[in-house]
Amino acid sequence: MGFFSEFSKALNGDDAGERYTVAGHSVTCSHCGGTRFHESTALLDGRAASMFGVEWAGGSAVTLTCAKCGHVEWFASGKLVERT
């Protein structure tokens, strides 16, 4: 699922998200303290990639959208993000 569909779920109060850990620690929303999230990915863009039109070749990050308030938590290394 894409970012906007996950964000829409969060805005509409769908709190059926999943719990996650990152590097062995439980993820909690830094805004409301929620513990359920919807996972997605986002491209990381750099100036050089934008200049040459190759944004797609850059890295990506894992985003966790809080199911309670819609706040998005970003994690650069998807290898550390685990659904519990």
Image (cartoon, helix red, strand yellow):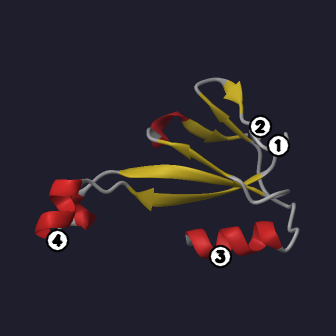
Mark in the foreground, 4 or 3: 4
Q: Earlier in the sequence, mark 2 or mark 1?
A: 2
Figure quadrant of the C terminus: top right
The residue wearing badge 2 is 28
Report how far apart the C-alphas of labels 3 and 2 lie in the structure.
21 Å
Q: Which amino acid type corresponds to the residue marked 2 in the rendered image?
A: Thr
Between residues 71 and 82, which one lies in front from this camera angle?
71
The residue wearing badge 3 is 5
Mark in the foreground, 4 or 1: 4
Report how far apart the C-alphas of labels 1 and 3 lie in the structure.
19 Å
Q: Which amino acid type corresponds to the residue marked 4 in the rendered image?
A: Gly
Can you see residue 71? Answer: yes
Q: Earlier in the sequence, mark 4 or mark 2?
A: 2
Q: At numbered mark 1, what does the secondary structure look like: helix, strand or loop? A: loop
Q: Measured from the top left, where is residue 57 in percent x and y?
A: 22, 60
Q: Which amino acid type corresponds to the residue marked 3 in the rendered image?
A: Ser
Residue at 80% in and 70% down: 11
Q: Residues within 10 Å of mark 3 (few under 14, many from 20)?
A: few
Q: Measured from the top left, where is residue 33 in percent x and y?
A: 85, 39
Find out whether the residues at labels 1 and 3 contact each other: C-beta distance under 8 Å.
no
Q: Measured from the top left, where is residue 82 in percent x and y?
A: 61, 39
Report how far apart the C-alphas of labels 2 and 1 lie in the structure.
5 Å
Find out whether the residues at labels 2 and 1 contact each other: C-beta distance under 8 Å.
yes
Q: Residues within 10 Å of mark 1 (few under 14, many from 20)?
A: some
Q: Residues within 10 Å of mark 4 (few under 14, many from 20)?
A: few
Q: At numbered mark 4, what does the secondary structure look like: helix, strand or loop? A: loop
Q: Which amino acid type corresponds to the residue marked 1 in the rendered image?
A: Thr
Q: Residue furthest left?
A: 52
The residue wearing badge 1 is 35
Picture quarter containing residue 14?
bottom right
Q: Residues within 10 Å of mark 2 (few under 14, many from 20)?
A: some
Q: Earlier in the sequence, mark 4 or mark 3?
A: 3
